[in-house]
Amino acid sequence: MIVGPLGTGKTNSWQVLLAMLERLDGIEGIPYVIDPKAMHKDTLYNTLNPTTHEWNDGLFTYILCKIVNDVCGESSKRHW
C-alpha cells in the first residue's frame, strides 16, 4: 500500500520498481490499483447478508481470489 499527497511520485515509484523487477527476474508483473475512496467499504471488501447469510465478495476479495487461483494454476506472474 502506497499513500501520500498528490504529485509526490507514488505511481511512478511502484511502476519503476515493478519494471526493474521484471528486467531482473524476467517475470511479468501485474499491478492491481484500487482507489478505496472511490467506493463504499462493502463494495471494496465484502458483505454478509444477516437474513439470508449470503456472502458477496467485494472487489478486494475478488482480486485476492483471482491471484490465488492464478498462483495455484500455471501462472508465473508477479501480482501487485
Image: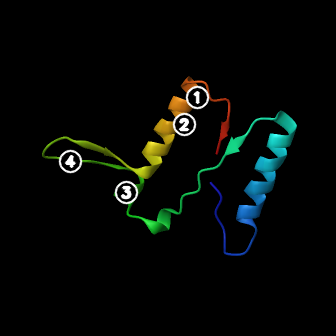
- Badge 4 density bin: few <14, some 14–19, many ≥20, Cα 10 Å: few
Mark closer to the chain start, 4 or 2 = 4
Residue shown at 81%/35% (left/top)? Answer: 26
Q: Secondary structure at mark 3?
A: helix
Mark closer to the chain start, 3 or 4 = 3
Q: Amino acid at mark 2?
A: Ile
Residue shown at 80%/41% (left/top)? Answer: 22
Measured in 3D between alpha carbons, the distance from the residue under mark 4 to the one under mark 1, in whole angstroms, is 30 Å
Q: Which residue is mark 1?
A: 71
- Badge 1 density bin: few <14, some 14–19, many ≥20, Cα 10 Å: some
**Is residue 10 left or right of 16 when viewed as pictured?**
left
Mark closer to the chain start, 3 or 1 = 3
Q: Quadrant of residue 75?
A: top right
Contact flag, marks 1 and 2 (Cβ < 8 Å): yes
Q: Quadrant of residue 74?
A: top right
Judging depth in this view, the residue of 26 and 80 nearest the camera is 26
- Looking at the rendered image, the quarter that the C terminus falls into is top right
- Badge 2 density bin: few <14, some 14–19, many ≥20, Cα 10 Å: some
Measured in 3D between alpha carbons, the distance from the residue under mark 4 to the one under mark 2, in whole angstroms, is 25 Å
* Numbered badge on residue 49: 4
Q: Which residue is mark 2?
A: 67
Q: Which residue is mark 3?
A: 43
Residue shown at 81%/55% (left/top)? Answer: 16
